[in-house]
Image: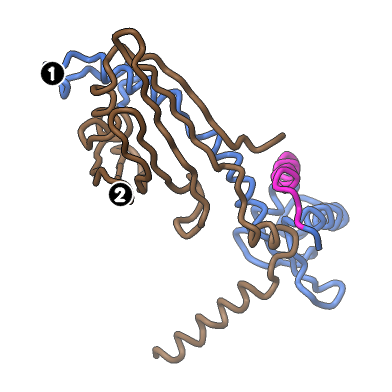
Chain colours: A blue, B brown
């Protein structure tokens, strides 16, 4: 039970999300809670065989967990921890210091006599 | 595909460090470039609070360094994670005089830190977690009824 590397975890999340069938499966599990492969096959336009294959891959990557149960009645559920790790990666990309610093520069350059009357930027936004 | 742990930007501004310092550390300043409304308790350990008009978007920062007019730093949570998540990044502004203006550097670090508990559950999540929480909720509701 060695600890996985955060990069490997994030990579598994993005690889899983890159495939539309796996996105559908994860979305269905997120929306409905624990569900069997058979029920997923009834919900999604994906064959049961393909669903089983995707679930195995998702389970190996730690993205879904199989609840203990009898073979055909195993229910799968989303495991949130890998998603939270992938969010660190997305957060670094989303922080957007570039537009904040551009705004800082513009606000400092605005005439000091009328700081509140500064014109909105070309997009009409304040952010 | 490493998670970038450190974001660094440098910008040259025409104004002297004292003006830039005001813009970075005052409520009026933060509300003019960073958010739309802000409150600041400017001292190490103090809290700054910023809100944006157009979104549900808001930020609470814990100020860690106040060294006018050269160094200002805070920690804050990671966007997209629940407020209860222990992860925080560290943001540090450094101001140095440059010509008649200011060279401003901002460094944000800590994105790649991942708590051990999260890594432990990344592959071995607690199957009983939700079921247990739901059972506890059911118990609580029964008692409360």
Identified at 44% across, 37% down, the residue is B91
Where in the figure is residue A75, as x and y percent of width and height?
A: 75, 69
Residue B26 painted magenta:
no
Which stretch is magenta? A3-19
Q: Residue at x 78, y 53 (%)?
A: A61
Q: Which residue is mark 2?
A: B47
- Front-most of residues A61 and B46: B46
Q: Is residue A19 left or right of residue B107?
A: right
Task: Kindly identify which numbered label has been placed on residue B75.
Answer: none
Which element carries disc 1, helix, strand or loop? loop
Q: Position of residue B3 (x, y in %)?
A: 65, 38
The residue sitting at the left extreme is A113
On screen, A111 above or below B142?
Answer: above
Rendered view: A1 above or below B138: above
How many numbered marks does the figure carry? 2
Quadrant location, the C terminus of chain B: bottom left
Q: Identify the residue at horizontal 51%, vertical 34% (top origin).
A: A94
- x 27%, y 15%: residue: B15
């Amino acid at each position: 039970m060695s600890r996985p590397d955060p990069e490997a975890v994030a990579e598994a999340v993005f690889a899983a999300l890159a495939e539309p069938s796996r996105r559908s499966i994860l979305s269905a599990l997120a929306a409905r809670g624990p569900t069997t492969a058979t029920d997923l096959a009834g919900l999604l336009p994906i064959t049961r065989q393909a669903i089983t294959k995707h679930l195995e891959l998702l389970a190996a990557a730690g993205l879904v967990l199989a609840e203990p149960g009898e073979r055909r009645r195993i229910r799968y559920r989303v495991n949130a921890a890998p998603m939270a790790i992938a969010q660190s990666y997305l957060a670094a990309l989303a922080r957007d210091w570039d537009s904040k610093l551009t705004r800082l520069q513009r606000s400092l350059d605005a005439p000091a006599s009328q700081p509140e009357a500064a014109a909105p930027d070309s997009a009409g936004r304040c952010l | 595909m490493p998670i970038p742990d450190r974001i660094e930007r440098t910008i040259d501004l025409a104004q002297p460090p004292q003006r830039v310092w005001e813009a970075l550390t005052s409520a009026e300043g933060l509300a003019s470039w960073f958010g739309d409304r802000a409150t600041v308790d400017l001292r190490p350990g103090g809290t700054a609070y910023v809100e944006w008009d157009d979104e549900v978007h808001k930020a609470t920062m814990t100020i860690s360094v106040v060294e006018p007019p050269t160094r200002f730093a805070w920690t804050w949570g990671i966007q997209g994670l629940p407020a209860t998540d222990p992860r925080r990044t560290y943001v540090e502004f450094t101001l140095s005089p440059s010509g008649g203006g200011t060279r401003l550097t901002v460094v944000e670090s800590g994105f790649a830190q991942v708590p051990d508990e999260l890594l432990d559950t990344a592959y071995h999540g607690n199957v009983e977690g939700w079921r247990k929480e739901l059972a506890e909720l059911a118990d609580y509701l029964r008692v409360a009824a």
